[in-house]
Image (tube, grey):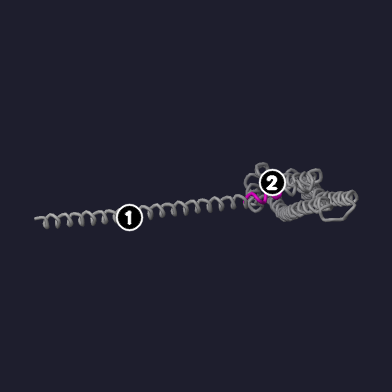
Amino acid sequence: MKKLIALFTVAGMLTLGLSNVVFAQGEKKADTQTEQKTDTATQTADTAAQVAVADTAASTAVATEENSFHQELKVKFIEGGPIWMAPILLVFILGLAFVVERIIYLNLSTTNTEKLLNSLESSLATGGVKAAKEICKNTRGPLASIFYQGLERSEEGMDIVEKSIVAYGGVLMARLEKNLSWIGLFIALGPMLGFLGTVVGMVQAFDAIEKAGDISPTVVAGGMKVALLTTVFGLIVAIVLQVFFNYLVTKIESLVNTMEDATISFMDILVKHSHKK
C-alpha cells in the first residue's frame, strides 16, 4: 500500500513538473511571438517614417527647385545694387509695355483683304458707292479706311482717288510705326545703363583696393559683382526687346505689302465700276 501511494506521489510530481515545463514553453513562445510582432511593428513604423521623411525631402526639393529661379533673380538683383539695377528694370518694363501695345494694335489692324474686296465689289455692283462706304465703316483696320477715302473721291476721277489713297496711306503707315522709336531707345538704354553700372562697379573695386592697401579677391569682389551683374541684366533687356522689335517691324512690313496689293485691286474694281456707269 505504501509503495502504491509512493508511486502515485511520484507520478503526480512528474505530471506537475511536465505541465509546468509545457506552460513555461508556451509562455516563452507567446513572448517570442509578441516580441516578433513588436519588432515588425517597430520596423514598419520606422519604414513609414523614412518614407514620410523622403517624401517631405522630395517635396521640399521640388519646391526649392521651383522657387530657386525667382529667388536667385531677386538675390542677383540686390547684389547688383538697387540703385543701378532699378533703372534697367524700369527700361525693361516700359519697353515691354510699348511692345504689348504695338502687338495689340497691329493684330487689330489685320484685315481679311480678299473678303473685304469681294464685299466692296458686290456692293458697288448692287448698291453703289454708298453701300460700299457702309461696308468700309463697319470694317476694322487701316485698309478699310484707305478704301473709304478712295470712295469719297470716286466722283472726282481716278487720278484724285489715287492721290488720296497714297496720301492717306502714308498717314496710316506712320500710325503703324508709332512708338517703335521708343522701343529702339529702350533697346539702346539697356546696355548703356549696364555699362554705367560696370564703370561704377570698377570704381568701387578700386576704392576698396585703395582703402585696404592690398589686392585680393575678397576686396574687389563687391565692386566686380556690381560691374558684371549690371552688364548682364542690361544685355538681357536689350536682347529681349530687340527680338520683339524685329517681330514688330516684320509685322508692319507684311501689313504694308498687303495694303499695297489690296489698293491695286481696289483701284481695278473702281475702274471696272466707272466703266459700267
Q: What residue type is labelled 2?
A: Ile
Q: For residue 134: magenta?
A: no
Disc ID at residue 28? 1
Rounded to the nearest angstrom, the CA distance separating label 1 from label 2 is: 85 Å
Question: Could you tell me which residue is drawn at 74 percent across and 45 percent down?
Answer: 93
Q: What element carries label 1?
A: helix
Residue 33 location (% of width, % of height): 35, 55
Give the class, few, some or many, for how many residues have Cα within 10 Å of label 2's Cα (few <14, many ≥20). few
Q: Main secondary structure of the magenta part?
A: helix
The magenta stretch is 66-74
Q: Nearer the viewer, residue 121 or 237?
A: 237
Q: Nearer the viewer, residue 85 or 41?
A: 41
**Image quarter of residue 127:** top right
Image-based side of 147 in relation to 42, left or right = right
Residue 164 seen in this snapshot: no
Residue 21 location (% of width, % of height): 27, 56
Q: For residue 72: magenta?
A: yes
Q: Which amino acid does label 1 sit on?
A: Lys
Going from N to C along the chain, the mark reached first, 1 or 2, is 1
Q: Mark 2 points at which residue?
A: 104
Residue 156 location (% of width, % of height): 77, 45
Q: Which of 159 and 26 is in front in this view?
A: 26
Quadrant of the drawing holding the N terminus: bottom left
